[in-house]
Image (cartoon, rainbow, N blue to C red):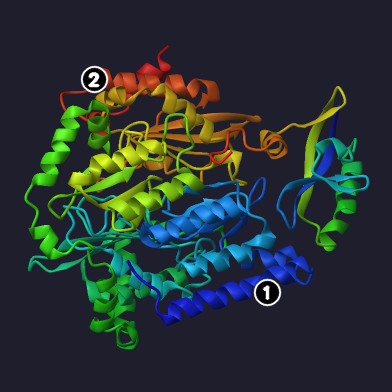
């Protein structure tokens, strides 16, 4: 994992001291709310419905067990004993007091964490494949590039006051687990004809009130050109992005209005013009190698080569002997690049629970299990789950028992019960309807693991407003909560997808009252089960037959 | 009977508070009620001195219904602010 150097540590320490002073001046009346608001937002502090909310950055979703323990400590000491993992791989605390926040940030700085770039019109925390470094299908670990982008973008004076917030996602694998096509910039690693790894550059994706799939503006870009090229994109956006209307200020609108080709041409021109100045300022190869060394797999080559298949054999035997464990394995294990190892997803979606929430005890428990079984490393996924990336196959059964003891063994990762859900109107000041109760209701209605296995891979995403923090546009089934004449109602979209075949879902028809949503989703799932062909997932079936059979089932009566 | 009250968040703690005859209260039952829009505007103006005194953040008017002696906000958003999240909290 990346460790702060002296500059990182100093920057974060100074930032905490600066914010401590700003809070003191606010509480003493020397700063008005109007003056203080942009300052607190730059430090991740929002004012929500019931209280302040602190959003803490988890760069590219990577956490150490020490950091997770600190988050647990903060939840227990300064909040109501829980935290909420978000669709941007961050964590939010819903109840901190303003007077405590400088102390919280001070505690975070002790473990190399902060809340910088979790709000405001800047380049936000960079997100990545939660399986980065470990996935069997990966070309290269994308996190050294993410870290480079983090260092470059942190307090970048040119990009601190952009027209609007800006989100970058990176994947090093062909299977897109980072939803790169619905980000302002998505970077997908692949090899060129000569076999050299580089990045496809996708720009102008996003969700919110104007959902769009990003457009490719560069098929392949060498890794050492990334920062200069990103700088060119940011300059074109900073110059031409609209500042007169916040709803039209994201880069996706600019790309859409001038066209991807024209946008690409401007970026290339800027890239060529600025190349002389900027490329010189880029970190040299030694610095990139220095960063990359932090992300070396914690499993040595000798251990990897020594795998004799006994671990996998032991895992197979445990699965054969225990049906419950086997069901969990089917949902939770992913193929690892190192023989004899597995990537384990820890679902934060117990039936009837709040998606993404974890208690302080659960965080401590995962931290302890990560120390025992995953070289002390944890990931946060944009699906609001946790991931243990370095688990020996031989130890998966023991890990599962530990998770089960902490109420963390829901066997639904990637299945219908693995619902993505924003905080909605229960917490969020922007929301128009509640989303958590809908997720809870569906989590129970969708039934146990066996039924969910029968349904197969299905993403259900719920947002409590058009800002789409719950990623409803890219859910196979998307649910958007709105308010109409003082009552909550829910619009359903079908056919969305956040992977390498990303698609925005189609609005299926008029919305449903809160009490009707469960039946509507049952009807959609039931229709799929009737029409599917052997081995066909929900999204494949939808792409084959279109919306009509679902519309008919939902509205014909 | 419908009316208006003023709500805000406490500056230091962030919790929901209501403007009352003798200051700010966490209990909606203590809220001062304006019976019409003109009175509501005056109530909001009066509450804004607390902003200057650094006690609350962003006060605004909330429409309420007075039923059997109890004040109840009309909009769901305000009902949730008054009662708290409608879902049990993970750590609770």
Mark 1 Cα shell of 10 Å, populated few (<14), some (14-19), many (≥20): few
Separation (CA) of disc 2 from disc 1: 62 Å
Are dots 2 and 1 on a single chain?
yes
Q: Nearer the viewer, mark 2 or mark 1?
A: 1
Report which quarter residue A74 is drawn in.
bottom right
Task: Give the total number of marks visible in the rendering.
Answer: 2
The residue drawn where x is 68% and y is 67% is A36
SS at mark 1 in the image: helix
Q: Which residue is mark 1?
A: A21
Q: Percent x, y for residue A327?
A: 25, 30
| A357 left or right, relative to A315 | right
In the image, residue A15 above or below residue A412: below
Identify the residue shown where x is 44% and y is 77%: A8
Q: Is residue A257 visible?
A: no
Lower position in the chain sequence, tag 2 or tag 1: 1
Q: Is residue A194 visible?
A: yes
Checking the image for residue A531, the label placed there is 2
Residue drawn at (44%, 27%) of the image: A442
Viewer-proximal residue, A298 or B54? A298
What x and y, as percent, mark residue A170? 30, 60
Q: Is B66 drawn above or below residue A552 in the view shown?
A: below
Residue B56 image position (x, y, % from top left): 78, 55
Quadrant assignment, res B31: top right
For mark 2, name the chain.
Answer: A
Quadrant, the N terminus of chain A: bottom left
Location of residue A551 in the rendering, given as x and y in whole percent from the top left corner: 37, 22
- Residue at 43% x, 62% y is A125
Dot 2: what SS? Answer: helix
Disc 1: host chain: A
Indicate left or right for B45 with A144 as reference.
Answer: right
Q: Is residue B27 above or below residue A249?
A: above
């Amino acid at each position: 994992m990346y460790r702060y150097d002296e500059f990182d540590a100093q920057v974060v320490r100074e930032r905490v001291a600066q914010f401590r002073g700003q809070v003191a001046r606010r509480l003493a009346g020397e700063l008005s709310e109007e003056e203080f608001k942009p300052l607190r937002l730059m430090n991740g502090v929002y004012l929500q419905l019931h209280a302040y909310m602190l959003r803490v950055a988890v760069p590219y979703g990577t956490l150490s067990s020490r950091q997770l323990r600190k988050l647990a400590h903060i939840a227990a000491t300064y909040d109501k004993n829980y935290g909420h993992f978000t669709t941007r791989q961050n964590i939010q605390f819903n109840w901190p007091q303003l007077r405590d926040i400088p102390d919280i940030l001070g505690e975070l700085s002790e473990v190399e964490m902060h809340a910088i770039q979790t709000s405001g019109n800047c380049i936000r925390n960079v997100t990545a494949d939660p399986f980065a470094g470990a996935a069997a299908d990966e070309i290269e670990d994308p996190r050294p590039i993410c870290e480079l982008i983090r260092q470059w973008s942190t307090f970048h004076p040119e990009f601190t006051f952009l027209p609007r917030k800006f989100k970058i996602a990176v994947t090093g694998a062909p299977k897109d687990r980072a939803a790169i096509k619905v980000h302002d910039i998505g970077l997908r690693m692949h090899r060129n004809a000569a076999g050299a790894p580089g990045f496809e550059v996708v720009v102008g994706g996003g969700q919110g009130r104007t959902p769009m799939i990003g457009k490719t503006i560069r098929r392949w870009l060498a890794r050492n050109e990334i920062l200069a090229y990103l700088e060119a994109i940011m300059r074109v956006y900073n110059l031409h992005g609209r500042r007169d209307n916040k709803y039209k200020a994201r880069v996706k609108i600019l790309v859409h209005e001038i066209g991807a080709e024209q946008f690409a041409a401007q970026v290339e021109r800027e890239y060529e013009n600025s190349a002389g100045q900027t490329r010189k300022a880029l970190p040299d190869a030694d610095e990139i190698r220095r960063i990359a060394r932090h992300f070396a797999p914690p499993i040595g080559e000798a251990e990897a080569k020594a795998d004799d298949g006994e671990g996998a054999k032991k895992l197979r035997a445990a699965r054969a002997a225990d049906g419950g464990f086997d069901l969990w394995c089917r949902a939770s294990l992913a193929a690892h690049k190192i023989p004899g190892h597995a990537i384990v997803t820890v679902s934060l979606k117990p039936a009837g629970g709040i998606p993404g929430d974890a208690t302080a005890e659960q965080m401590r428990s995962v931290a302890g299990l990560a120390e025992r079984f995953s070289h002390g490393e944890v990931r946060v996924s944009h699906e609001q789950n946790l991931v243990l990336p370095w688990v020996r196959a031989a130890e998966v059964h023991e890990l599962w028992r530990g998770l089960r003891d902490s109420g963390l063994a829901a066997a639904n990762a990637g299945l219908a019960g693995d619902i993505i859900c924003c905080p909605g109107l229960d917490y969020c000041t922007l929301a128009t309807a509640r989303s958590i109760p809908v997720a809870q209701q569906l989590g129970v209605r969708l039934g146990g693991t066996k039924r969910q296995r029968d349904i197969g891979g299905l993403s259900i995403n719920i947002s409590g407003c058009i800002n789409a923090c719950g990623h409803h546009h890219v859910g196979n089934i998307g649910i958007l909560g709105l308010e109409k004449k003082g009552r909550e109602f829910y619009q359903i979209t079908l056919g969305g997808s956040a992977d390498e075949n990303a698609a925005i879902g189609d609005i299926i028809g008029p919305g449903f009252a809160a009490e009707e949503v469960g039946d509507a989703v049952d009807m959609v799932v039931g229709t799929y089960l009737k029409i599917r062909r052997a081995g066909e997932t929900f999204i494949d079936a939808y792409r084959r037959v279109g919306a009509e059979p679902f519309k008919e089932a939902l509205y014909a009566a | 009977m419908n009316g208006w009250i003023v709500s805000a968040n406490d500056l230091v703690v962030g919790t929901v508070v209501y403007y009352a005859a003798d200051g700010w209260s966490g209990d909606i039952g203590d809220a001062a009620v304006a019976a019409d829009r003109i009175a509501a505007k005056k109530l909001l103006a009066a509450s804004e001195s607390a902003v200057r005194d650094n006690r609350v953040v962003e006060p605004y008017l909330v429409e309420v219904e007075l039923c059997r002696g109890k004040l109840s906000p009309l909009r769901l958003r305000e009902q949730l602010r008054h009662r708290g999240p409608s879902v049990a909290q993970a750590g609770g």
